[in-house]
Amino acid sequence: MKQFQTVYRDRESFRKSVAEWNAWREENASGQALVHIFSDGADDADVNCAREIVGQLLPDASCIGASASGNIYGGNITTEKLVVTCTVFEHSDSFVRTRFFSIENRDVSTLRASLRAMKADYAGVKAIEVIMTIDTIPIREVCAILQEEIPEDIQIWGGGAFGDNVFTAYIFDKGQAVNIHGIVLAMMGGRDLHVMSSYVIGWRPLGSALKVTRAEGKVLYELDGNPAYQIYQHYLRIPNDEHIFYNALEFPFAVSHQNRILLRHALACHDDGSIDMSTDIPEGSIVHLTYGDPDTIMQNVSICADQVRDFGPEVISIFDCFGRKSFWGSTEGSRETRPLHKLAPTYGFCTAGELIRWQGGMDHHNLSLVVAAMREGGPAEQKISEIREEPRQNESSMSMVSRLVNFINTATAEVIEANSRLSIMAITDQLTQLFNRGEIQRQITERIQDNCSAPAGENATSLVMIDLDDFKQINDTYGHNEGDQVLIAVSAQIRTALEELGNGAIGGRWGGEEFMVMLPGMTLEAAADFAESLRMRIESLRFDLCGRETASFGVAQALPGEESDPLVLRADVALYVAKKSGKNRVCRADGKGDPTTKKTVYESDAR
């Protein structure tokens, strides 16, 4: 593969450059050519002139282009307005062909149908470069369609054309008019073509996790029930003004998606505290605020460069988010791209979003650096050996900012862990490790309130109240230590029985030697069966001093419209009947009648 690159400054000098490219190609190569035209605010007339000359002098070459927020020229992010790159495939069976799709009114149905109809076109294709107008199409749906309809062994990478208040984002394909709502694919293949792709983030988590409690499309309303902007105001003192994009750029949100981390950054903030995000973050997502650390970013770039070096590329495609360029500043953004250019000639532009098929999934990224390395044939060993590595910062070193953030994150994690332990202790009976009475009572009340109107089927709720028989005699005769051992052993049997159910059933210590079990989705009969099984478990226990212990059970199922207190009372009355009937048995409450008439379901000899 061979790459030519130039800046368009005037018609004649550009025409001369393209003529030279074509002359080299005719003499040295037998494959096809792909031309990229990227415009960072260039005049339409200049863009059209460049397209015209390429069409005249390279008539059989594919040609695609887009609007950019900065062009990559000579390995640097440049301020040149119009950069044109020609990649020549030298092997005879290497090929490139482009496909253009217009997506009107955000309707992607025709895109799916077209990709599905292109099955024959994928023969021999190794990789597809994608450029699209991200802001005018449903990008997440497009990514899903690309993932589903394009064979999984084809690598995909690309980026979004850039637009702002001055310039509208656009793309074009050879022979097609400029389009502001579409997608263009450059499909590359051939027996000797090899491609590897990767991406770099480099932002690090800051503070604890947050839950998206309200979001609609790209508008993020609430995090942990609070206005989304509060995170920036409270912790970072970022004002809600027209500069929020630049002030918050160093602190995007990281979203976990299919074992990958995606970054999403704020674009603007509204008076109600909601934030316009670069891409939608679905409700229920768990996010982390992150910060941009130059050392971490460059370490990640170095890791990526090492992988590319081992691949031995001839040409490298780079799609670099314009947000990263803004993060570095106008003169420092090239720090990321120069290490790659030392490995092979590069081309690309600063995008409005990036995309890459990675580990079986297709994602839309923000604030990422997407890299695709290409070569024909095996790696060029001589070129690889000539590459001299720049001195690299010791990877064990950390900047002062990194150390401070590490301290904050560690301290925050320790506080969260301590609070979690305190929360568990607050609802747990320390002796039995079951819920305490306050918590089991709270959960019963909540369950009954949620299912009060029709407590049947999955919404049914049954309670089992348990009381150890003659427990006072154990304490009085053998001491409280023996009594505690009985309580611990009985509690273990309750926990084991509940775990075996696996239906969300819970148990708690009601007080003293009393226990309460809540069985969601279980009828009175099923609950009574469970109670009898538990009764036999307890009866089979043996203790060093007291020998054995038994328990009595009262079972009740919630009735339509019944609140939690009357339900608990009916279970308590059934337990009272079990005690009066001889203990060590299960009694159930069948209804609201005279409690002394409750049916004894199971009976066994008293202890």
Image (cartoon, rainbow, N blue to C red):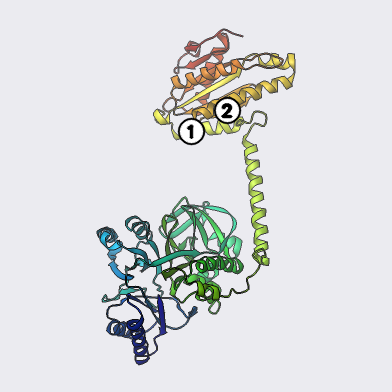
Q: Name above or below for residue 569 compared with residue 37.
A: above
Image location (x, y in percent) of residue 12? 35, 92
Residue ID at (37%, 65%): 127
Horizontally, residue 214 falls left or right of residue 177, namely right
Q: Quadrant of the C terminus?
A: top right
Residue ID at (57%, 8%): 582
Q: Which badge, 2 or 1, is on the more N-terminal residue?
A: 1
Image location (x, y in percent) of residue 106? 31, 62
Question: Mark 1: which amino acid?
Answer: Arg
Residue 59 position by quadrant: bottom left
Q: What distance separates the C-alpha of mark 2 from that of mark 1?
A: 20 Å
Answer yes or no: is residue 228 visible: no
Residues 383 and 472: in front is 383
Q: Name above or below for residue 576 compared with residue 151.
A: above
Residue 291 position by quadrant: bottom right
Image location (x, y in percent) of residue 66? 36, 75
Q: Which disc number belongs to residue 495? A: 2
Q: Which disc number belongs to residue 447? A: 1
Label 2: which secondary element:
helix
Q: Quadrant of the N terminus?
A: bottom left
Q: Residues within 10 Å of mark 1 (few under 14, many from 20)?
A: some
Answer yes or no: is residue 398 visible: yes
Q: Residues within 10 Å of mark 2 (few under 14, many from 20)?
A: some
Residue 98 position by quadrant: bottom left
Image location (x, y in percent) of residue 51? 31, 82
Residues 249 and 502: in front is 502
